[in-house]
Amino acid sequence: MENNNTNRFDTIVLGGGPAGLTAGIYLARSKARTLILDTGMPGGQMILTYEIANYPGIEKTTGYQLSATMAKQAKTFGCNIMSNVTITQMDLNSDIKTFTLANGEKYEAISVIIATGGRSRMLNVPGEKEFKGRGISYCATCDGDFFQDKNIIVVGGGNSALEEAVSLTKYANKVTIVHEFDHFQAFDHAVKEAKINSKIDFIMESHIIGFFGKDSLEKVQIKNLKTNQITEKKIDGVFIFVGYEANTKSLKGSGIKLNKWNEVIANENMETNLKGVYTAGDCRAKKYRQITTAVADGTISALNALNYINERD
Amino acid sequence: MVLPTNLKHVASAAELEGILKDKENVMVCCGRMGPMCVPVYAAMEELQEEFPNIEFRDMLFDNPEARVIRELPECRGFMGLPFTIYYKNGKVVSATSSIQTKEQIKEILKREFN
């Protein structure tokens, strides 16, 4: 694991969420020269979580705090972290993997861990980009108080959508949940809590197909997926919680095998189809996406990357 | 009342007025320590080195003095934190609502201040 080239590492980790930071902690603690390249800031989606109450060993914390602690831990062991970088080129197929950044700097590594995570899915319908921050929000804890006594819509049928809908009733006059199916994917207790809340009503088997307004959002068009009927609804705000998608766009053409949802395919050792390339966290094809599962993936990928590096020495 | 960030802060309307008088290019991010705001502060921290000709500041949204930003005509219709304002020679030249990436911020800085 000894080398003098400052841009040459044993492992480059793509992504600094809980999976990437955990990998960084394990690798750096084992004296592997490790670099985390993050297109945003360390923490990934974890930093967007207001309160975390199910991370074992910590009764209650914020995503911001847990992210900062994990990043500090990784740095303490000697892990290098570069945030807000743009990777313009990568070669994952060669024996030595290479990455070129937008500023022209090049980095090399023996092994790579892809931990690029996921991001909130957008509806991708007309008006969504224009009214982001002007009535459309993806964060109830951030923007809920702008909607005091207003009428709002929550889009989605998972745990986030139903739990946030209930929390938004603290501010809003009326919350309408719009969901594409005739049932919810959320846990029973979350569904029950939403259903007994008198401020919440439901529009099922329907999609929002357009956002309209002037300075801010004023109305939406909703399509009933069963009847194809399109109706307009006057509304002050829309909160969108329609799940996550993997951040793997930059991997297209890299040779990494993705499934039909663009998630990285790997075995239980986190090995991808390319030698020396591992994956971890929410970008991996798997069922459960939690901070704890990301941390577990990060550990496994790091230990296997270490084996790979040591076998080469 | 200021934010616990590593940026320089704006604590009052009078202080902002002074900064706008003294500095040609100013970016002020007005928010809280929430998930949509923190990534913007982090991007600003990094952009400070790259753009020494710009004054980067933050301001606590809940500070009553922040009405100097909250009530700007350019912020009409804003319903997402943070409110980020770009001033050139004391005048607002751009304003955004909600989270922005480093690249989006950089694009505005280059467009408005270069």
Image (cartoon, rainbow, N blue to C red):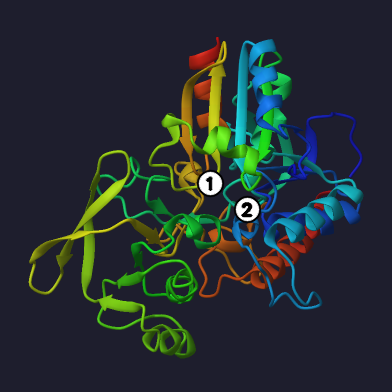
Expressed as whole percent of the image width and height from the top left, the position of residue B100 reads 52, 38
Vertical order, B59 against A133 (above or below): above
For label 1, count other residues whose C-alpha is less than 10 Å away and answer few (under 14), some (14-19) or many (20+): many
Q: Amino acid at mark 2?
A: Gly
Q: Is residue B8 left or right of residue A144?
A: right
Q: Which mark is on residue B81?
A: 1
- The image shows residue B36 at horizontal and vertical percentages of 57, 49
* Nearest to the observer: residue A115 or residue A128: A128
Question: Residue A40: in sight, yes or no?
Answer: no
Residue A168 percent location from the top left of the image: 46, 69
Q: Earlier in the sequence, mark 1 or mark 2?
A: 2
**Secondary structure type for disc 2:** loop
Q: Are marks 1 and 2 in contact (CB under 8 Å)?
A: yes
Tag 1: residue type?
Answer: Leu
How many residues crowd mark 2 within 10 Å: few (<14), some (14–19), many (20+)? many
Residue at 21% x, 75% y is A205
Residue A189 % position (x, y): 48, 89
Q: Quadrant of residue A131?
A: top left
- Tell me the element at label 1: loop
Q: Quadrant of the N terminus of chain B?
A: top right
Q: Which residue is mark 2?
A: B34
Q: Nearer the viewer, residue B85 or A249?
A: B85
The correct choice, above or below, for B55 with respect to A233 in the image is: above
Most foreground residue, B42 or A267 = B42
Dot 1: chain letter: B
Is residue A37 found left or right of A176 in the rendered image?
A: right
Question: How far apart, in angstroms, are the residues tagged by discs 1 and 2?
Answer: 8 Å
